[in-house]
Image: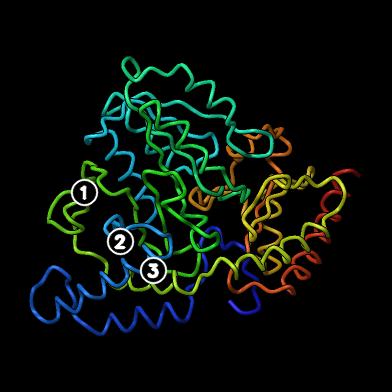
Amino acid sequence: MPDRLYLDHNATSPLRPGVRDAMIAVMKGAHNPSSTHSEGRAGKKILEDARGVIAETVRAPKEGVIFTGGGTEAINMALHGAVHGPMKVRRLMVSAIEHDAVKAAAEGLPETAGVTVETVPVTRDGVIDLEWLADRLAGYDQETEGAFLLAVMLANNETGVIQPVGKLGPLAWPKGGHVFVDAVQGFGKLPLDFGQMGADMMSLGAHKVGGPTGVGALVIKPGLALAPYLRGGGQELSRRAGTENLIAIAGFSQAAKLARPEGYAELAMIRDRIEAGLPEGVIIWGQNSPRLPNTSCFSAPGFRSETQVMVMDLGGIAISAGSACSSGKVRQSGVLDAMGASEEEANSAIRVSLGWTSTMADADMFLRLWKNEFQRIVERNVA
């Protein structure tokens, strides 16, 4: 569709040309990394080279990188593996702003494993409430309550607010807890150091930074044992069965090389220009907290989310009203609910997310159309 402006990179980012080229190169061969002939060995080299790139990008041990079919699978693998494996987790503490993939995976486990799920609140600024967490864990008794897993995302997919994940391990570990960080939205946009992050497990995905959909990774600490989520062959050191998607993994690797945090940092200027041009009365969520440089979430009372998405789409601009993983419907944001938004504020929120194709001219184009529609709709409602 020509002459359209795409501002929904947190849902998925267009495939980078260099990623496409890397994938096409692998498509030309017949590579099963488990095979022992020359073609198989060539596939194994592609696989292990890609594993090395991902490990280097997030500063993690290479043997701790497990390739998956995407971020959602990595999340389910982490939670399932912690509950059903040697960690014997019996309690899941999930932040109130987690992605639906984490919430749904956690909520499904009590039905099959008898675990307890607790919600960790966040502040009005969208940051996990560390004081609440410290108080909750102060009297935590592993003997009676069991081992627990604390699940907190690195950066929120709707507001872009960055969580203080480095402070979680020192709170959780002394009480027999483990830490899982969903870093899908932060991968490639923020400098990552798994060793310094204080996490036991971390999920990644490729398609938020110009890589292909359907590929991701779970990164785990050395020596951490998980119950396999998928069973079958011995791929990924028997931790994730199934022939690896080598074409997508090659694309994942190339996206990791191309998506540099310093490049995303420059997008903050475009985001700030958009926010500076918004009319009085608009609420910018998380603006007092560290945020992803490419993400702006704001509410315009009187201008409903679904109306904004529709009129902008008709005008040639793609935006969203929350997580794309609830696609097909525009619903009130659970993230904003957790941050204390009123019903009117939550129902008038949209997300603008920038990416590798974005330019400063995009900010001006967005503001021209959005402000025109805002004035038209809000004035009509007032009249």
Q: Secondary structure at mark 2?
A: helix
User: Between marks 1 and 3, how big is the CA–CA gap?
Assistant: 21 Å
Q: Is residue 162 above or below residue 204?
A: above
Mark closer to the chain start, 1 or 3: 1
- Foreground residue among 310 and 113: 113
Query: How many circles with numbers are drawn on the protein?
Result: 3
| Residue in the picture at 49% in, 76% down | 16
Q: Which mark is residue 252?
A: 3
**Label 2, label 3: how many angstroms apart (C-alpha)?**
15 Å
Q: Which residue is mark 2?
A: 62
The quarter of the picture where the C terminus appears is top right
Quarter the N terminus occupies: bottom right
User: Which disc is residue 337 wearing?
Assistant: none
Residue 205 percent coordinates (x, y) = 42, 59
Measure how far apart labels 2 and 1 are at the Cα level. Answer: 21 Å
Which secondary structure, mark 3?
helix
210 to 26, vertically: above or below: above
The residue under the point 14% across, 81% down is 39
Q: Residue type at mark 1: give it.
A: Leu
| Disc 3: CA contacts within 10 A as few (<14), some (14-19) or many (>=20) | many
Which numbered marker is on residue 230?
A: 1
**Res. 68 visible in picture:** no
- Which circle's residue, 2 or 1, is located before the other in the chain? 2
Residue 298 visible in the displayed image: yes
Answer with mark 2 or mark 3, whichever residue precedes in sequence. 2
Residue at (28, 33) in percent of width and height: 83
| Residue 6 picture location, percent across and down | 62, 68
